[in-house]
Amino acid sequence: MLSSLEKIDEKIINNKLKEYDIKTIKELAKYIIEEFKETLEMTKDDMFTQMFFSKLVNNENSMIFSAYESDVEGFFVFVYDKGSYYTYYISDEIRKIIKQKMGI
């Protein structure tokens, strides 16, 4: 997660640090992971949540963009240009949490 955050424009990172009242990118990465765990824990038994995360993981790095804007803004996924289309990848830490909690 940390290496992915370090690639993001400094202005965006600084805004997130201010928004969450956090001092470093390392703390931001930890915060994002913990928030994601808590949110997923509260919704993991919902059938639609299970379907969403299954699609999100299965469509990673493909032409099918299954992530929501809020997933990008929350740094749960990272968008990149694959030449003729945009796609996303999930950080290893977030993917691991999804697979553990959702059984994917």
Image (cartoon, rainbow, N blue to C red):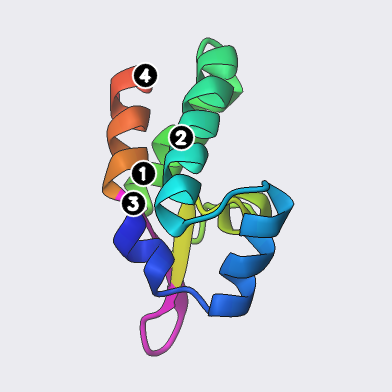
Distance in Å between CA atoms under marks 2 and 1? 6 Å
The residue that disc 2 covers is 53
The residue that disc 3 covers is 91
Distance in Å between CA atoms under marks 3 and 2? 14 Å
The residue that disc 1 covers is 57
Where are the magenta residues, as a range? 80-91
Where residue 90 sits: x, y (%)? 37, 52
Q: Give the mark toward the camera: 4 or 2.
A: 4
Q: Residue at x 42, y 75 (%)?
A: 80
Distance in Å between CA atoms under marks 4 and 2? 10 Å
Where residue 21 sits: x, y (%)? 67, 48
The residue that disc 4 covers is 101
Q: Nearer the viewer, residue 36 or 15?
A: 15
**CB atoms at circles 4 and 1 under 8 Å apart?**
no
Residue type at the position of mark 1: Val
Residue 63 visible? The answer is no
Residue type at the position of mark 3: Ser
Q: Give the mark toward the camera: 4 or 1.
A: 4
| Helix, strand or loop under label 4 | helix
Q: Give the mark toward the camera: 3 or 2.
A: 3
Of the image marks 3 and 4, the number of the one nearer the N terminus: 3
Distance in Å between CA atoms under marks 3 and 1? 11 Å
Of the image marks 3 and 1, the number of the one nearer the N terminus: 1
Where residue 34 sits: x, y (%)? 47, 30
Badge 1, how many Cα within 10 Å: few under 14, some, many 20+? some
Residue placed furthest toward the right: 19
Q: Residue at x 68, y 65 (%)?
A: 15
Badge 2, how many Cα within 10 Å: few under 14, some, many 20+? many
